[in-house]
Amino acid sequence: MNALDRFIGYFSPARGMRRQRERMLMQRAYEGAARTDGWRPRRAGASANADHQADARELRIRARSLVQNVPYIARGLQVLVNSTVGTGIEPRFEGRDEERLNKLWARWIKVADADGIFDFYGLQAAAYRAMEQDGEVLIRRRPRRLADGLPVPMQLQLLEIDWLDSQKNGSAPGGGTIIGGIEYDMLGKVRNYWLFDAHPGDAAVVRRATQVSKPVSAASIIHLFNPTRPGQGRGITRFAPVIARCRDLMLYEDAELARKNLETRLGVVISGDVNAIANPGGEAATGYSAAPIGDDGKLPYGNLGELPSGGITQVPAGLNVTALEPKPANDYVSYCVMQQHLIAAGINVPYESMTGDMTKVNFSSARIRQIEFRRDCECMQWITLIPRLCETVASWWLEDVELAGLAKVQDASADWSTPRWDYVNPQQDVNAEIDAISTGLLTPSEALRRRGYKPDQVFSELGSDFERLKASGALNLMQFLMANGRADSAQATAPTQPDA
């Protein structure tokens, strides 16, 4: 084929159809992947650690500012802490020496905090609060001497994530790498955390020229965070998705407040002969009430003087007076409510709990939302807090109990109980549990655990209470009263027979 034939074939209909088919095959099947809409995600393809290194510090600073200054954000964080940790996630130790272990634990939790501020359950709440606000928090194991007089020679120190040297990156001594202050060995396991000897934000530390971080073994550190991406080594604040929206809403609220302030004031624009404004004769010459006159014989700018309520004030001839009255903005409340709904969804907290607004709540909607919120909190309890925080602390504690020779811990284990949930409708919920137990779908022990109680303790108390009631003679009286109460209830609910 000569050059002329190839030239003619290039523009042939068949070739044009092939090119059109190729273009159709190259078109995207998903509209969301089209690049013609101007959407350019930032740092596309970056790892979780790269995103953290770039943004985590700024996000943390802004999240703290929101918690400090925005009422519904502060309330939303408190709702998370109250619902997930509450009064504490409590263990009950089981094993050959379980009674001794549980007594030691009850004494130790009162002095668990190395700073002397919280008990152990207060440490749980403070650690979880810091984790949600900052994205991550550190709990450091502090061994103590037997001479210190503690029930178990160990305490815990709660450290804000600022203690971690996030700017330290590179090769680690002895092999491995350091990423964001965390040292990994050759297999990718965390080996050390590079910590400062004081909080870098303290005033005394700021005045120093330099601050050097030192490695602390990962075996004595709990790095508490909730990873959302594979390979993620650091945590991001829960408030990251709503920071920009909260800031925009705050600016809108400030503008509305300024507009409300302007509504309470009267502004006037005057046009005409400026000499008429001088009013050298005062009230006697013109017949209207004038403002105090300045040294130049003219009215001071911006002062209308005394304006009589409900009266008519005469102004000099030739002046045009225009009153400025700001108009109220429509839908301010509905716009704020919509934005707060989105913010509540972003931090995964019920809108009503975050804002206290119960105007549109009914029984069904409250129940459905609370069920979903409970599932979220239970996931946080059993996937993050208990395995990463509670179980680690329990293993540390049992090690020190064994080293100090205080109890036998060879077969000891901890059974954790989460705080109980209050029922939306107690009567219906309790009857539903009774039906499930009576049909074999639920055990009494599981029902008690769901409510935050320890089954063994409840059964033991029931037995001892029964024996005391029986010995005192009060049991017969209680049975008599309960039987009469059931009879009265059945009589009240029985259908009445029509008169013959």
Image (cartoon, rainbow, N blue to C red):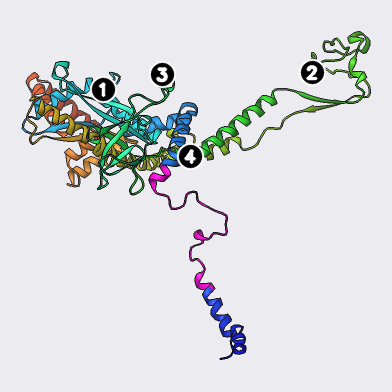
In the displayed structure image, the side of residue 52 where residue 86 appears, left or right: left
The magenta-colored residue range is: 23-52
Type of the residue with mark 4: Val
Residue density around tag 2, few if under 14, some if 14–19, many if 20 or more, within 10 Å: few
**Amino acid at dot 3:** Ala
**Mark 4 or mark 2: which comes first in sequence?**
4
Which quadrant holds the C terminus?
top left
Mark 3 and mark 1 lie on one chain; the one further toward the N terminus is 1
Q: Is residue 27 magenta?
A: yes
Q: Position of residue 261 (x, y in %)?
A: 66, 24
Q: Which residue lies under the disc numbered 1?
A: 113
The disc at residue 204 is 3
How far apart are the two marked residues, 4 and 2, measured between alpha carbons? 49 Å
Task: Return the residue at label 4.
Answer: 242
Q: Nearer the viewer, mark 2 or mark 3?
A: 3
Q: Position of residue 414 (x, y in %)?
A: 16, 34
Amino acid type, label 2: Gly
Label 4 and label 1: CA atoms lie apart by: 33 Å
> Picture coordinates of residue 423 (x, y %)?
32, 35
Residue topped by disc 2: 310
Dot placed on the residue nearer the N-terminal end, 1 or 2: 1
Inspect this view and state whether residue 32 appears. yes
Q: Quadrant of residue 368?
A: top left
What residue is shown at x 54% (from left), y 53% (from top)?
39
Above or below: residue 415 compared with residue 99:
below
Amino acid type, mark 1:
Asp
Marks 4, 2: nearer the viewer: 4
Residue at 17%, 42% in the rendered image: 443
